Image (cartoon, grey):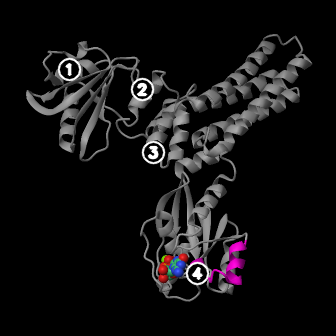
Amino acid sequence: MIDDTIAAVATAVGEAGLAVIRVSGPESFAIAGRCFRPLGPQKISLPDVPSHTVHYGKIFRRNRAVDEVLVSVLRAPRTYTREDVVEISCHGGTVPTKAVLETLLEQGARLAEPGEFTRRAFLNGRIDLTQAEAVADVIRAKTDLALVAANEQLAGKLSRRIESLRNELLAVLAHLEAHIDFPEEDIAPDDQTEMTGKIRRAIQSMDRLLVSATEGKILRHGIRAVIVGRPNAGKSSLLNCLLDQDRAIVSRVAGTTRDTIEETANIRGIPVVFVDTAGLRTSGDAVEREGMRRSLESAAKADLIIMVVDATRVADPEEAELTRQLNSAVRFTILNKIDLLDSGSEGSARVRSRPDVLPVSCLTGEGIETLKDAISEKVWQGGLAGGRAEVAINRRHQHALERARKASKTALDSLTAGRTLELVALDLRIATDAVGEIVGKTSTDDLLDLIFREFCLGK
Ligand SMILES: Nc1nc2c(ncn2[C@@H]2O[C@H](COP(=O)(O)OP(=O)(O)OP(=O)(O)O)[C@@H](O)[C@H]2O)c(=O)[nH]1
Ligand SMILES: [Mg+2]
């Protein structure tokens, strides 16, 4: 039972038109009522007003008006936390916001911990753990696509898949336990086949969910794409083009970029961190050599390498060596400055028809949209059905599913090998618990602390 009342500022700190202070718990109306004086024609008292109504008035602290506010009164259980909730909209300055919050704390509310409102929504059974995590995903979504995925999870799509998986495992477990209770009866071949079939199907659904871990990682954290190439190839120009912003210095002097420059862009719904690097060549001074070392270091950590080649230059051995060095990673070769090629020429036709390179011009923008499509295609590798993520599990879900899969596999092997049923049941129990952890059916305080610590204050 949760018996205290919590309060926190739910909006971001700083100057804004409005700020919202949220209060939740059994004393919400009483506490807010002691600070609030209505300014309307009717003399109302907050604890008595109907649910889901808004009231105009002032917050008073020791008989001094602190701020003019609107107070929303939301009665349990139709609220975010399923508790009585009051939301106070005040002026969005740091000082009035703090004054309103402190008034509430003086009247008996306790300052909420990060994520505590959502934690209560979970503890009171309004949402499960995957939905609680989805709230954080919605807030943090970096692209529209990430938001779509977060909303699907918030709506319970992942919850339903996990629940049905857990129910399948529980059904086998119940079946097994019935046999364990009557050890003198042999397990019928039909029963055996049915149970192994069910475990196999459960493992298959785990595999299908596990595949979405990559999508989940991409949508939540994005990918790193490092732009490399010879000096003057147009790497910084490409960065600016992709960002649609004059971020890096561009000049005709070879060796302009000396340090790595990072910036995030939204490429077809994928948050991509582009890294512009110093041009790679064997000559150059100490600073340039350090720049090159950083370029190669960045390239080694990249999910995607974009190799920029100047279309007007004949390929040189150094470039070939560079290409060889970077061969292992997922890579694009961009042939830049195609605007300089004589469009009717044979050379131009040859360049444009090469299947392994993407011709672009950072000057005219030609080929840039095709490059964005190519990046998106490469990232999803055909994995994102219809351009949207139905489920996209996070790392916690992935680890739990991997544990569940391993235990289910062991259970399946024991069952087919005719080992004692207690052993099979033991492993299936481990699998069921691991699956249950994902939605919070089996959870510890430590796990909850870990999840909600990541939340912002007031959520
Ligand atoms: N005509 C033409 N010029 C380009 C194009 N892209 C880049 N340039 C020019 O090429 C020169 C070098 O461009 P940068 O973007 O600075 O090249 P970089 O690869 O970052 O060079 P470093 O930082 O020195 O390694 C500049 O003068 C650009 O204006 C292009 O598509 N067409
Ligand atoms: Mg540069």
CA separation in Å, label 1 and label 2 = 22 Å
Percent x, y for residue 117? 39, 30
Checking the image for residue 33, the label placed there is 1
**Label 3 vs label 2, nearer the camera:** 3
| Sequence-first disc among 1 and 2 | 1
Amino acid type, mark 4? Arg
Checking the image for residue 120, the label placed there is 2
Describe residue 352's horizontal placement relative to residue 141 as left or right. Answer: right
* Dot 3 and dot 4 residues touching (CB under 8 Å): no
| Sequence-first disc among 3 and 2 | 2
- Tell me the crowding category of disc 1: few under 14, some 14 to 19, or many 20 or more residues within 10 angstroms, Cα based: many
| Sequence-first disc among 2 and 4 | 2
Q: Which residue is mark 3?
A: 140
Give the extent of the magenta segment. 338-354
CA separation in Å, label 3 and label 2 = 20 Å
Q: Which residue is mark 4?
A: 230
Percent x, y for residue 170? 70, 21
Residue 71 visible from this viewpoint:
yes
| Sequence-first disc among 1 and 3 | 1
Q: Is residue 384 above or below residue 440?
A: below
Magenta highlight on residue 152? no
Q: Is residue 252 above or below residue 295?
A: below
Where disc 1 sits, the SS reads helix
Describe residue 65's horizontal placement relative to residue 445 as left or right. Answer: left
CA separation in Å, label 2 and label 4 = 56 Å
| Sequence-first disc among 3 and 4 | 3
